[in-house]
Amino acid sequence: MIITRLKPIEEILTMLEKFPASTICVVGCSICARKIQTGGEAQVTSLVARLSSHGLDMLDGKMVKHACSAKSWDEFIEENPTLEKAGILLVLSCGAGVSFMGRISGKPVLPGLDTTSIGGSLADNTIEGLCSMCGECDVGIYAGLCPKSGCPKSQVNGPCGGSNDGDCEVEGRKCIWVTIFETLESRGMLELLDDIKPPVCHDRRL
Ligand code: SF4
Ligand code: SF4
């Protein structure tokens, strides 16, 4: 699941100011963004109302099945002929969905969400920051607990030294390195941490 959060309304308004005044259609995505309630029907309706209250020309909000799928896009335009009137699509999906629509729609496409990581869900809870797509997955040596995405400093060779009583100095929750150490220790596999790893190579993301 791709983790997203709604941009502040001020940022969305500033973004819109850079484009000529036009009819705007807010489009939600029925997969991840809907599941974590950043781009479902309720968020689309709410954003349309907020932007209308700022005097912007809005179409009714719409939901696409998968923002990142050409098949969904074809169905979407077939089912929503009023979309033709939209001069701007403001998309509540992950960055992949926004970029995909930017390529396929032939219209200016703006992001309404910020994409932060790949996560998961446990019962009704969303778990953020499980993966940041580094392009060189070695999470097995960290007991399956990725420090590149679970640590705000992406420390790959142990904690940064700023943790306080086992809590992260940046985020005020348990330092992921404490959990990695405890888990590997309980499995008798601490030697997996013996080798010094090079810093994360950001080129591998490309
Ligand atoms: S090591 Fe890289 S690919 Fe693997 S979970 Fe962590 S960020 Fe994701
Ligand atoms: S305290 Fe732990 S989780 Fe927080 S930045 Fe330092 S190493 Fe990373």
Image (cartoon, helix red, strand yellow):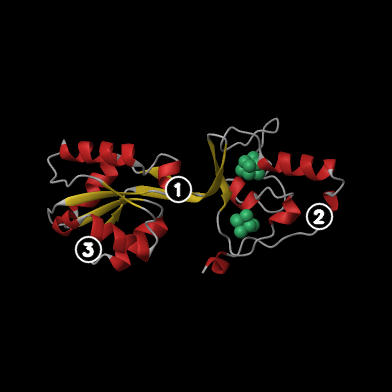
Give the residue at x 27% y 46%: 12
Mark 2, secondary structure of its residue: helix
Three-letter residue code for mark 1: Cys
Label 2, residues with CA under 10 Å away: few <14, some 14-19, many ≥20:
few
- Mark toward the start of the polypeptide (3 vs 2): 3
Give the residue at x 58% y 60%: 134
Q: Nearer the viewer, residue 206 or 75?
A: 75
Give the residue at x 65% y 49%: 147
Residue labelled with disc 1: 32
- Where residue 10 appears, as percent x and y from the top left, is 26, 41
- Where residue 103 appears, as percent x and y from the top left, is 31, 68
Residue furthest toward the right? 188
- Mark toward the start of the polypeptide (1 vs 3): 1
Three-letter residue code for mark 3: Lys
Q: Is residue 59 left or right of residue 71?
A: left
What's the mark number on residue 192? 2
Residue labelled with disc 3: 107
Residue furthest toward the top? 165
Q: Mark 3 or mark 2, which is nearer to you?
A: 3
Q: Mark 1 or mark 3, which is nearer to you?
A: 1
Q: Could you give the CA–CA distance between mark 1 and mark 2, rounded to whole angstroms?
A: 34 Å
Mark 1, secondary structure of its residue: helix
Q: Could you give the CA–CA distance between mark 3 and mark 2, rounded to whole angstroms?
A: 50 Å
Label 3, residues with CA under 10 Å away: few <14, some 14-19, many ≥20:
some
Q: Is residue 188 left or right of residue 206?
A: right
- Quarter residue 187 falls in: top right
- Quarter residue 140 falls in: bottom right
